[in-house]
Image: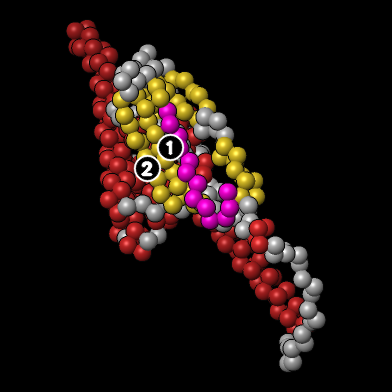
Amino acid sequence: MYIGDLITYTIAITYDSSYQLVPPPLGAHLGAFDVKDYEPDIEEILPDGRRKTQTVFKLTTFTTGDYTIPAMPLIFTLPDSTRHLVLAEPVPIKILSLLSDTGDSLDIRPLKAQHEFEGMINPYYLWGGMALAIIVTLIIIWFVRRRRKKTGELIDLRDPWEIAFEKLAVLKQRNLPDSESYKLYYFELTEIAREYLGKMYEVDVLEMTTGEFLESFEEITMPDGHYDKTIRFLMHADLVKFARHVPERQRLDADFDLVHGLVESVRSEFERRRAVDGSQAAEPVSAAAESREKVA
């Protein structure tokens, strides 16, 4: 391919209808390319009853060299709830320069003679000022660190969902999509979701990639349907953050509502389990109190 050419990259998956497909994390694997357009999750049922899912990307890049779209991980959930992983083949792509066909030379030209500027600052004053600025900066850093050690870091003792709801409200109020700050919007939205899930399920997910997140939460029971929804959300966010995809406004609002609903669903499930555990723990205490009354 040549610089600026559109590359059509297609993932087509054919599988048995009794299997459940976890969509592959495509966004983070396309970082070397700009995503100009994509058609996600085009599904059809084949005459033999199997399902076919297809995702088509339109890619381009403006740098030359050898690139490879790495092997894509595909995960299937079988009827017995076990999961299996298969890998799609990696795709090597060579991007050529248009100048190679025109005969233009890319040799470095010789350096021009140095130009003397009149009235320049004495270099001794310049170096002295820079040294003084560095010393002052080091003193400020030392003072701030010493003060932090004395005061200690403040710990937010609120429930994780209270913190998440507050951050979502602040993010919505900032109206980042209105200024087309899509990348920053999704960085903050995914960080809120990751931080919340990490606290609720005691998993350090903030530094994980989407694929690592998928593997870490395989054995964790999330509220019904939210595992797959979260994976799809993170994959779409990867496209915006790493592949410069421009999302539709409707999708921006839908992803915000998805994270808000995720926080509420996990909170409700946590409260329900805590209530059940509390009632079970209370039964022996009640029985012991009753036996003491009989003895009395």
> Seen in the image, is 117 located left or right of residue 211?
right
Sequence-first tag of 2 and 1: 2
Q: Residues within 10 Å of mark 2 (few under 14, many from 20)?
A: few
Question: Circle 2 sits in a helix, a strand or a loop, which is it?
Answer: strand
What range of the chain is rendered magenta?
1-13
Residue at x 40% of width, y 45% of height: 38
> Seen in the image, is 71 located left or right of residue 126?
left
Q: Which residue is mark 1?
A: 198
Q: Which residue is mark 2?
A: 39
Whether residue 135 is situated above or below residue 4 in the rendered picture:
below
Residue 256 in the image, given as x and y percentages of width and height: 31, 48
Residue 123 in the image, given as x and y percentages of width and height: 77, 82
Residue at x 77% of width, y 71% of height: 109
Residues at discs 2 and 1 in contact (Cβ within 8 Å): no
Mark 1 belongs to which amino acid?
Gly
Residue 8 sits inside the magenta stretch = yes
Location of residue 288 by image quarter: top left
- Say if residue 8 shows up in the picture: yes
Please tell me which residue lies in front, 219 or 8: 8
